[in-house]
Amino acid sequence: MVRVDGSDSSKALIRVRNLNKKYRRGAETIDVLQGLDLDVDPGEFVAFMGPSGSGKTTLLNLLGGLDLPTSGSVTVAGDEITNMSAPKLAAWRARHVGFIFQMYNLIPVLTAAQNVELPLLLTGLSKSRRRQQVETALTLVGLADRTKHYPRQLSGGQEQRVAIARAIVTDPTFLLADEPTGDLDRGSADEILDLISSLARDYGKTILMVTHDPRAAERADVELHLEKGVLVEAGSSPVAS
Amino acid sequence: MKYLPFILRNLKRKKTRTILTIGSIAVALFLFGLLVTIETALNAGVDVAGVDRLVVRNRISLIQPLPLSYQQRLLQIPHVTRVTHASWFGGVYQDERNFFPQFAIDTNTYHDVFSEFLIPDDQWQAFVADREGAVAGRSLAEKYGWHIGDRIPIRGTIFQGTWEFNIRAIYDGTSGEADESQFWFHYDYLDERRAWGEGLVGWYTVQVDDPDHAVEVAAAIDDRFANSAWETTTETEKAFAAGFAKQIGNIRLIVLSIGAVVLFTLLLVTGSAMATAVRERVPELGVLKTLGFRDGTVLGLVLAESVLIALVGGGIGVGLAKLFTLRGDPTGGMLPIFYLGPDEMALGLGLALAVGLLAGAIPAITAMRLRIVDALRRV
């Protein structure tokens, strides 16, 4: 279940309360998010839509602990991340969040396997265990035969698959995807959406995705619109709880 | 260690820049190594000078001689245990380029006073027994391919004519800083053949029973010969060697000045390269932080990169300097002890490390302070 009305639920994995984010541009103050409430239960696949500048990416950044709100709170699995110190927040991100970016954001000098291994370097896993997990993740995204390829040797769709493998390799609590198909052609975009949907459907991953693309949003269990800094439920897909 | 492959990959990102930066550090540290070697060479006499030895020379200048008769009179001064003398010969071997120090020595006393030079007893006895005998330092003998028994002609520039010597002994130094380029022969041989200056010696070296008496003995010697035709100046061997070195200026200051300029330039070059590298990588640093890399880890990664570049460059530079010095004195005799010691090599690497840390500090702090959302916005 996804709720935007602030009603409490003991099941919620992600709980956002009265979230505000203001930016200053010179003398002007811009209210990007205004008293936003959100509850997401485990295993939900939520799509955030809205016009450019509506605050979708800002919301994602706050949910992922990449930025701090002006006020309000974000609680994930009982941990209020908005009160965490920077080192603690970094450790929390490494453990709980998998990020998928529009531009893939792979490190160009590392191979696909090395890119996927990056988050595992922050764990205490042995080299052989890391290698095993990297192979599993790359196999899951269908790139087991591309482990030694550099990003420049891969297509956009393949790069995004590597980025997804990097996001899931540590088996995080939830995934955040920011326009994951925004830089891809239709065919590749469908493949990536299939993969993300499969992660939600088959592996029970909680996924929060920002997108401009209505076809991408349709894949989600719940579609939310961000308008004037607040979330509005647009409707639920048949599979939504 | 698990981050090492990542650091190495980053260094390969802009190979030309990395190679040029390493190259500039290598050149600077090579230059540093040579400067230190030259400084060491010029001060070598100071470093190895005996603390219980005094040098007695003519008060007017070092090139003015002293009478041979002073030897016995010096021995009469309290606390003096041994007295030996040496005279500068100034000859050349084969041609002018082959210059090395040749001393006509008192064979009865010289070896006892300069016991830091190691000579097998049988060789020393053979030298003493042969009036035309000579002792060569190890590096000198190796340089010219001399062996025991070889007959060596030296052309005199102060004392005319060709003087022939039989190599009877080869000495070794007890440390890397010992001068193994000297050539000794009998004072008696010089004195009987030379056309002028009979009965005169270049300088005396006086050994005292206790270094604490050195100042007192030096004053006593100079008092003893005051108002004579051959007045003396007596100083510790260390002071004598330091004074000799200072004749060409304050070497340490020159070396430090050049070294400081080189290192400062190096800091700018390396710092600029690292700053550019970090600037180009801002989005990637943002990604690392997004994945959970802590600010301190990001700082460490950038610093490690800078330090690695500096140490590789420093290692190459110091290594090349060492290789260069292994070829021996490049001046043909001006710097007989051309030696880059382990302490100096460690100092060079320490400086490279410092350059790496300092040059990488600002870019690393910038990377550490980078806000993730700002960094990702630059993708």
Image: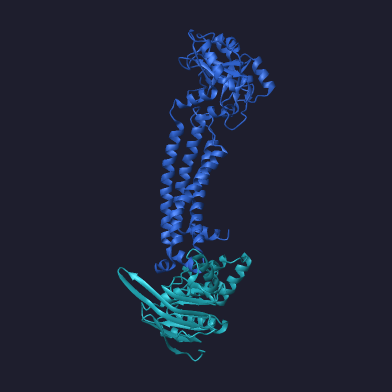
Q: Nearer the viewer, residue B139 or B340?
A: B340
Chain A visual colour: cyan
Tell me the colour scheme of the image: by chain
In the rendered view of the protein, which quadrant contains the N terminus of chain B? bottom right
As drawn, B47 above or below B354: above
In the rendered view, would you say A15 is above or below B134? below
Q: Residue furthest bottom?
A: A238
Tell me what residue is drawn at x 59 percent, y 33 percent.
B176
Residue B358 x %, y %: 46, 50
Q: Position of residue B82 (x, y in %)?
A: 62, 16
Q: Quadrant of the C terminus of chain B?
A: bottom left
Q: Which chain is blue?
A: B
Q: Nearer the viewer, residue A186 or B232?
A: B232
| x and y percentages locating residue B328 in the rendered image | 54, 33
Tell whether B81 sits left or right of A212: right
Q: Residue at x 56, y 82 (%)?
A: A204
Note whether B35 is above or below B118 in the view shown.
Answer: below
Q: Residue at x 44, y 44 (%)?
A: B263
| Residue A57 in sight | no
Whether residue B235 appears in this view of the structure is yes
- Give B350 or B191, whichever is nearer the viewer: B350
Residue sitting farthest toward the right: B122
Looking at the rendered structure, the number of numbered marks drawn on it comes to 0
Task: Please state the horizontal and vertical placement of residue B265, each as a whole percent of the image.
Answer: 41, 45
